[in-house]
Amino acid sequence: MPKSSQQEAERHHKAMKKKQKGLRKVLTSLIILQTVFTVTPAWSKGDSNTLTYGEFLQKIDLGQVKKVDIDPTQQVATVTLKDQGDQSPAKQVRLLEQNPELIDRLRTKNVDFQIKQTADNTTLINVLTNLFVVILLLGLVVMILKRSANASGQAMSFGKSRARFQMEAKTGVKFDDVAGIDEAKEELQEVVTFLKQPEKFTAIGAKIPKGVLLIGPPGTGKTLLAKAIAGEAAVPFFSISGSEFVEMFVGVGASRVRDLFKKAKENAPCLIFIDEIDAVGRQRGVGYGGGNDEREQTLNQLLTEMDGFEGNTGIIVIAATNRPDVLDTALLRPGRFDRQVTVDYPDFKGRLGILEVHSREKKVSPEVSLEAVARRTPGFTGADLANLLNEAAIFTARRRKEAITMTEINDAVDRIVAGMEGKTLVDSKAKRLIAYHEIGHAIVGTLCKGHDPVEKVTLIPRGQAQGLTWFTPNEERGLLTRSQLKAMITGLLGGRVAEECIFGDGEVTTGAGNDIEKITDLARQMVTRFGMSSIGAFALEEEQNSYLGNDWSNRRSDHSEVISAKIDSEIRSIVDECHQLATKIISENRAVVDRLVDILIDEESIDGDTFRTLIQELGTKFPLPVSALI
């Protein structure tokens, strides 16, 4: 028996002993209470309607007693005196257990007396009391037995699968509710057809795929696709998270995998959806947890169940992950996850479709252009776009409007991109310095050929930033040219260069700290990964497959110290070249920069179209020739 299970059994035994001890205390208290209520005699009230036994005998001797009713069961005599009125109550006398002289005295004095014996309920009371104690005792025993059964059942059900099961998953999601990922939908629609009409494929010798792996960044709709498959397929559906296989007890994860596939085989054809499979499917033999790691045992069992000696028929496993780089290669081979479907960021058409889906249940003003919103939100995932419309709806309700307008959507975009709006700075030296910094970014980025167009320049603080300038690409970009990368570096340097040109080297601020980090990273990638330097087309640094994510701090260097010195020199050369170009743009357009800063301070925000119009009206060099960046 494993040590952990033995310790669990000991703890359970101690808990049972503690419950039994508490039960004995309760029973003892009940017995004492029963004795008190059934044995304690009735005490005399001590009021004017009672007589002592001596006073009663004395009144008999004096001839003052008119009538006596004797109850031998209760040992009580009801006495009516001669001198009391008709409305006065009779006197009560507590008799002794043996009263031999009482009857003789009553007869001697010719007192009218009767013996009225009442029913004796003492036995019935005792029986009812004992029955109540027995019933209470049985109830306590049944309750303890149920708890013990539940505890033992939980202890024995560690190896049972915790997957949610539905004969026909009514998720409320169909393929019509999924937009922006048409290629992935087409791949998965075939899976639904496999389940509904398998003969259509088996007639020509095609085999049903055993597994489909959904790969993509967070928020792109992987889990939503799984819900759509469940809603369309109308077959039994099991859903579970990868983390639910992992427990502290050895062998529990593998046991749950076996139980899951056993239930699935009993309900085939069916679907199994495993969300975040990287929690259990990480590469084996990486040194974490030793050779007998619990996660490895769970993964081994999953591999065997998907495509082992026995195999499975009619079961399709759908898994989702945003970390395909850490998955074990045996999990990705054909026969296990036959298809790997990439669910990537949506393009313009996809974003427009997603916005149309999420705007169905919201009151949107007719003036709102979803196309304009889709063009303004490149890089947004489906979850981001859903959150965008939800934030816009919240702004609309807060402002007590009846429908969502472009104002609320623009405010929602600003909040998602840059953070919550803060308090505006008063007109001071700090505000003017921030204005020059942001105008520097905007004008350098606008006048650089190949740079993304300006979307907005603002002095309204958002998040940790005191001012913001952001750019939005006109089209979806998959590849970047060297001129575009240099334009990005030059635009990032625009803020620091504006501070240097206007206020001098002694007045530069820490506001460019994040810009400098991005500049250094872009320049290093140009030299070490993209071969865009005089060193040549060599991959001098490569990213490791680390569990810590895609972090450049985890890159591996395979070169000498001489090459390292050349890399540093090339990085400096690229940054210096871009710095000179940014300085030239700011210096030659100093009057335009001053005018734009005054406008920005007055209005606090300038949108991209207005900014480009102002630049053309003020007569800048627009744009610089491409040769200036090469």
Image (cartoon, rainbow, N blue to C red):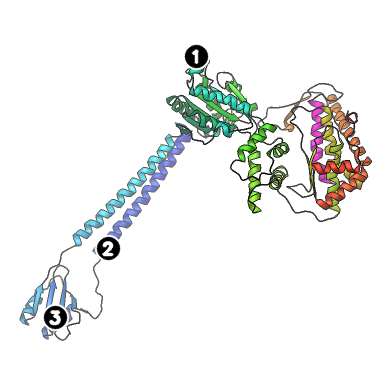
Task: Say which label, 2 or 1, has the lower sequence index.
Answer: 2
Q: CA distance from mark 2 to mark 1?
A: 85 Å
**First along the sequence among labels 3 and 1:** 3
Q: Which residue is tagged 1? A: 203
Whether pointer 2 and pointer 3 mark residues with C-beta atoms closer than 8 Å, the reply is no
Residue 56 image position (x, y, % from top left)? 16, 80
Locate residue 140, reporting x and y percent.
34, 49
Given the image, on which type of amino acid does mark 2 rest? Phe
Q: How many marks?
A: 3
Residue, disc 2: 37
Q: Which mark is residue 57?
A: 3
Report if residue 517 lies within the magenta region: yes
Mark whose residue sits in front, 2 or 3: 2
Regarding residue 285, the answer to whether it shows in the image is no
Compare residues 228 and 55 and report the one nearer the observer.
228
Name, please, the residue furthest toward the top.
204
Q: Amino acid at mark 3?
A: Leu
The residues colored magenta run: 507-533
Q: Secondary structure at mark 1?
A: loop
At x 61%, y 22%, the residue is 329
Left or right for 53, reference 475: left
